[in-house]
Every structure is written in structure tokens, then in C-alpha cells.
Amino acid sequence: MNGGRKPSGGGRGRSATGAAGATGKDGQQRRPMFRRRKVCKFCADKIDDINYKDTKLLMPFVPERAKILPRRISGTCAMHQRKLRTAIMRARQLALIPYTAE
Amino acid sequence: MNRKYELVFVVSPDATEAQVTELQTQVEGIVQRMGGTIEKTENWGRRKLAYEIGRHKEATYVLDVINGSGELMKEIDRRLKVFDLVIRHLVVRVDENEGVIDRQRTKRTDTARRRRTARGLPPDRQPGEGQRGEPDDDRDDRFDMGLEDVR
């Protein structure tokens, strides 16, 4: 399926032990890559209320370019990502969070 | 039809404090006239804006929590659009969301308590009973962010 194109960790595998391919494309020996399993911050910290007024909570999810951090990177679960999105969009309207970086 | 709304309005930095309170009393006036109540008002004071609005770089924020009907909020919305001093405003209905959050919270504590009693522990967490740190948390994964999608 993978066709051997990707050196390691292709797809969306969330395995905690990392990818099996220890040899890179360039033939270099690599230690097997470990990836920490990503956990939704809001589930883990039991934050029920994602509020648009709480900029401290939202800011980590809008990195420099001020785009919303995608789920595949932050590991946020679908439900919380949705809530996060509305909260960020509301905060943006009130100029609490930027739309873009200048 | 009683609903709970949050209103935040952003007042231009040129406005004096008196003008801000004047705006606030205007809002209160509308709320009272249309049969609503104000639950809470909060003045966040002057804050830096995340981006420039017009030529302004900072502004005063005021938050109101209002109980009332949809027509009331419509009226407030309309009025706030007219004032030049108000550079931004936002009305959000909050009662439904608060209910959901409340239910989630009670559900969580309930299940936690049930599990604890099933394990023969007192239902609430005791002082000094901390969470153990995750054993494999110190793995070096600083450079792994998003790597799985690089192609």
C-alpha cells in the first residue's frame, strides 16, 4: 500500500511505538522514531468550556501565522476542535486574537 | 422567552470614561424597556487590539450578561451598529452551552465517584493523592511535531 515511498511513519498511524522502518530513504541508519501519542488537551485537562474570552487558552492554537492549528498536529479531538474553532473565530471578531500576522 | 446572552462591545479609545458609562446606561435602558435584566457587567478596561481597527491600536472592552428575548438582542445589535464610538460588538447566546457544560461536569464527577467507590475508595479525591507522572513522558520528541505529514 505504501509502496515503500515514505521512509517512515507514513499515514496517520498513531502508534506510540513509532514507525517500524529504521532505515531512511538515504540509506542512513536511524534509530526507530518514537512518537508520543497525541492527546486532546481539552480531554486530558478536562476543560469543558472553550470560551472565546479566554485568550490564554486559545493562543497556543494560533501559532505565529495566526492560522488555527490543525487537528493532526495538535491532536485535539474532533469535538473540541470544533468548539475551539468557534471560540477562535469569535475572539477574532473582537480583536482578541489576530486574523493574520502582520 | 427568557434566554441568556453575552454582549461584548469594543469602544473606541477616543471615548472618555464618561462616554463609556453613558453607552452602558443606554444599553441598560434598552434592556429595561424591553423587559430584560442585566445579570452582570464587566469592564475589561483598555486592551491592546490584536489587529488595527481603522486606525485604533487599543480599545476599551465592556462585557454584559443579559437575560432577555431575542428581539431585545436584535434591538441592541441594531443600536450598537449605529454608534460610531462602538467599533466592534458581539452577541452570543450562552444558556444552552452552559447547560451542556454543566451536564458534562456532573456526569464526569459522577462517574469518577462511582468508580472510586467501586474500588473501595472514598468518593472524593484525598489530599496528597496525586497523579503519577507518565513513565515514558521524557522521550525526546521535540522534533516530531507534524512530521507524519511531511511528504
Image (spheres, coloured by chain):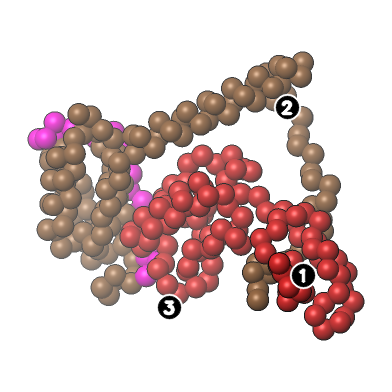
The amino acid type of the residue labelled 1 equals: Ser
Earlier sequence position, callout 1 versus callout 3: 1
Q: Please report contact status of discs 1 and 2: CB closer than 8 Å, yes or no.
A: no
Q: For this view, does A44 lie left or right of residue A47?
A: right
| Residue at the image point whose x is 36% and y is 51% from the top | B44
| Residue at the image point whose x is 65% and y is 21% from the top | B113
Q: Which chain is brown?
A: B
Answer with the quarter of the image where residue B6 lies: top left
The amino acid type of the residue labelled 3 equals: Glu
Rendered view: B140 above or below A48:
below
Quadrant that contains the C terminus of chain B: bottom right
Image location (x, y in percent) of residue B121? 75, 18
Q: Which mark is residue A102?
A: 3
Q: Which residues are magenta?
A: B32-51
Residue on which disc 1 sits: A8
Q: Which chain is red?
A: A
